[in-house]
Image: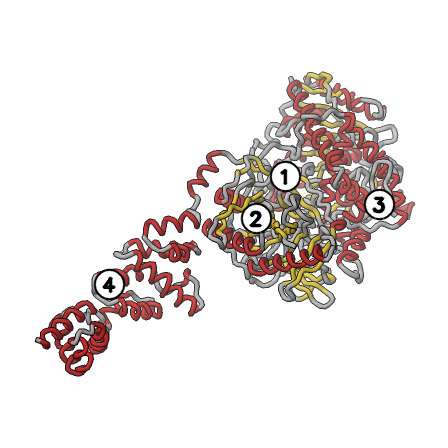
Amino acid sequence: MEYLTTIGLEVHVQLRTASKMFCSCPHRYGAPPNSQTCPVCLGYPGVLPVPNRQAIEWTMLTGLMLGCRIARYSKFDRKSYFYPDMPKNYQISQYDLPLCEGGYVEVDLENGDTKKVGITRIHLEEDVAKSTHHSTTSAIDFNRAGTPLMEIVTEPDIAGPEEAYAFLTSLKQILTFGGVSDCNMEQGNIRCDANISIRPVGQDGLGVKTEIKNMNTFSGAQRALAYEVERQKEILNSGGRIEQETRRWDDVSGTTELMRSKEDAHDYRYFPDPDLMPMVVDEAWISRLTAEMPELPRTRKARFERQYGISPYDAGVLTADPELALFYEAAAAGSADAKAAANLVSNLLLHALAEAGMEIGSSPVRPEHITSLVNLVAEGTISSQIAKDVFAVVFETGRGPEEIVRERGLVQVQDTDQIRTWVRSVIEENPGPAADFRAGREKAIGRLVGAVMKASRGKANPQLVNEVLREELTRGGV
Amino acid sequence: MSERTANGMDIDYVAQLARIGLTPAERAKFQGQLEAILGAMRKLDELELEGIEPTAHAMPVHNVWREDRAREWDVKDAALRNAPARMQDSIQVPKIVDTSG
Amino acid sequence: MRDVSTAIRGGELSCREAVEALLERIERFDGRINAYLDTTAEAALARADAMDRGARGEGRLWGVPIGIKDVIAVEGAPCRCGSRMLDRFLSPYDGTVVRKLKDAGSIPMGRLNMDEFAMGSTNENSGFGPVCNPWDPAYVSGGSSGGSAAAVASGMAYGALGSDTGGSIRQPASLCGVVGLKPTYGRVSRFGLVAYASSLDQIGPITRDVTDAALLFDVICGHDPQDATSLQRQTPATSAGLEGGVKGMRIGLPREYFAAGLDPEVEAAVRRGVETLQGLGAEVEEVSLPHTEYAVATYYILATAEASANLARFDGVRYGHRCSEPEDVTDLYFRSRAEGFGSEVKRRIILGTYVLSSGYYDAYYLRAQKARTLIRRDFEKAFERVDLLAAAVSPTPAYALGACVDDPLQMYLGDILTVPMNLAGNCGISVPCGLTAGGLPIGLQLMGPPFAEAELLRAARAFEAETPWHRKQPDMAVLEQRSAEGA
């Protein structure tokens, strides 16, 4: 039987603030256990939370980037449940008045279409601690507890695991462009839960859904959802019934397992947190944020194609990462040839960075280096072949291309007399190809050009070499 | 042996939510006392509260927050000083079986 | 408190001597009163010595030891909140009020007994035994700041801090014959106050007289960025205009506070007190707070709901009591909390959990939040007509020990005259206004709108200056004798 899949996601995103949500502790990843804690994030007796303004503002900014309505009145609530990773045994979260509601993320589908996945709401809460499990005990590290955590809830608009992956990728791009999160999956900056159901084609109402938790990477999410679709299909195909339950994804075994059934559903006893005052947002604040809002990835990609005349593919590569996009724009700014700059960045630079295991942020090649390389070629000072060599040296040393070109005498030889000397000796040493060319075999000139370039150690201007060769060959023939 | 009092409280369910173990004697005593207390609380049913705004805070203040500046707490090892059981730099509990979230 | 301060300032008394004098009295009398859970003598003496060695500071409370209710955090000191749950717990930080006391040169001293987690009106809910009333140890001190009130009444503290969620400063002050001020919600930082009901809790002074209360309040009040509910607005020191009198002040008598159930001796003393104020030039009129009868229900729903979340952190994981050999995390929670908490705390947590639980929130919690709005409006309306309100604090004088232990509802109903003010966020004070025939103190409660501490203290001071009650003290010799007989 054919089935339709319906998925809704809850994406948890750690904000890249300097301090935690309700106290001043930093939340650096990888710090020694419990070294980034204080009485507040440890839930000590007598402490009080004070909210981080930046986290509130970044949640609103995210809402604006996703086209949400920003709440004019919002508040924090306590969500009660007992768990050792939760210092107060209640989480400060938002229940009925989240900071943002509505909105969407545009997702490119495999067939080339674009789809809008609806956003139900975005609210702000605090992350919990991390526990490590041993044979009979668990050890808890509260460094992560209290990290500002944005929960983005989608509508059940996602039609399959691949689409979920594409959605997460688009969302991540927007969040990194907005500068609100590092979205580093290895560090748990972005994690998601899913609600998923299937129904036979032709059935109107949605099927019974299960909730999948513990998906820590986008590819993990895609695999988990694919697994769950198959699991549900098998049950339905064998005449069984799907139980409404929460299941846990195990990335190692590649399976989901039962965590709790519907009967064990939590009674969270939400109520307004008396320690925290409501938030009132006025038009002025929203206008300021709107003005500060960065260009979204899709808009920027379209602009790159238009403004720099580069291919959709290159524009896509260059806008995938906000830092890279900034890098490229800086490089293109003074370049005589924006397309050549795009080639250098998206081919040479990204390749070299990948090989060295580096990020764009730590690139030894700076945007101005790319600009001068592009311009050196455009002015004819060096050949594009030499440009590649110079790039390699810049990458290695971090020194400027002009300096390298000057020092190593890589300046292209434009002197026709010098070139003629090389050309004559090459014709002399290669009577075969010379004769071939004279006999009308145009292609034979390629070998001769190559030989001249070799003789000049790459420095001869290929255009001139070509011209002089033709002159000499034709003259000799007369 | 879950049962509700006249005022609707399933004391076992509520004690479970609150993670408080009750002895049979306590349970019996509380059941009667809580029933009487809830009865007295139902006095609020007399009030016409349609359209009345709920009060969550004693003072009508809003937008209270702090700037995003990090400051490490300088008391070394403080997180663990009061811990009933620890494992190196972490707090130890019996093995957690994951049912959270 | 002022005497000690003056003596230290004048060089007649060293800081160490001020501490030692208290320690001696505690040694002599506290066996019978049980006001101190811990004297923190070592830390107090160390601080006193350091101060004696150094230059004399300008602080308003230089060298004066102030007793601290066990619910307020002092770095390095126990903070058990009267509970076995926090038996070996040491606070790693100072609460804001403690920092302010230290900045003023005071020596925070001792951990004063209280009802467990501030839940109670008799102090019999302490995990470490009840506090006895210094006027007659067969009677309760009141609660939950019973240790603070009894220590001040018996001269075992020059002044103390308490906390008031539904009357926990005013009521024991009234029953022990001392002055207790509950400030406007948000005027004193709650950072470092272990929360019972966060939207109602407020720290305040308990002292021998009104002038001391004003002095101590001036030291501890003020905006605190570590408490998001702390108010920005600043007002002049209350001490300054303290002697301004009550001439022309309008004082309202809430009709509902003089209803049936008020003990005749209490009523008589309070009415005499009001007459005194009238004699001093205050204009007295009757006013109405029509929703008073709903206040106890409203209070107990809201306070226990907040408490159920506030006390969830006491789980035996990061600090506090952990049961022996827990089988798993669930067992750890259930047994640690069953063993650590006393009956009243368990009862209130269960009640608060229930009123927030699925299906009951609207019927209880939300209704109570709305009723709170009505109670607030009652006060707002009354304060359009009058400057202050006057009434009793407790409908009865102190109960005999054990009289109310198994009837929590009866005990809750006794809070009728104090809880409405916490719900409204107003300020209030209890000043001694008489003694019963049996020799137990009675307090007069004055209540003001938000930020009216100065007017409140001025009226209380005028009353005090005209009456002998604040100078009366329990006969400690009799107490000592009884104590010896009992031993």
Answer yes or no: is residue A346 visible.
yes
Seen at 66% across and 23% down, the residue is C380
Q: Secondary structure at mark 2?
A: strand
User: Disc 2: which chain?
Assistant: A
* Residue at position x 21%, y 61% in the image: A379
C424 sits left or right of A320 in the view: right
**Along the horizontal axis of the image, is A162 left or right of A338?**
right
Q: Amino acid at mark 1?
A: Asp
Q: Which mark is residue C309?
A: none
Give the residue drawn at x 30%, y 60%. Answer: A340
Q: How far apart in space, not on screen, are marks 3 and 2 (Cα)? A: 56 Å
Horizontally, residue C184 falls left or right of residue A388, namely right
Q: Which mark is residue A376?
A: 4
Report x, y in % for residue B69.
51, 50
Q: Amino acid at mark 2?
A: Met
Query: Are dots 1 and 4 in contact, CB under 8 Å?
Result: no
Residue A433: give x, y in percent of width and height: 20, 79
Residue A121 in percent (x, y) is at: 58, 43
On the image, numbered disc 3 is attached to which residue? Answer: C32
Mark 1 / mark 2, whichever is N-terminal:
1
How crowded pointer 3 is (Cα within 10 Å; few <14, some 14-19, many 20+) is rated as many
Q: Measuring from the top left, give residue C102's x and y in whole percent.
A: 61, 46
Q: CA distance from mark 1 to mark 2?
A: 15 Å
For the residues tagged 1 and 2, is the chain the same? yes
**Disc 4 to disc 2, C-alpha distance:** 47 Å
**Residue matched to label 1:** A96
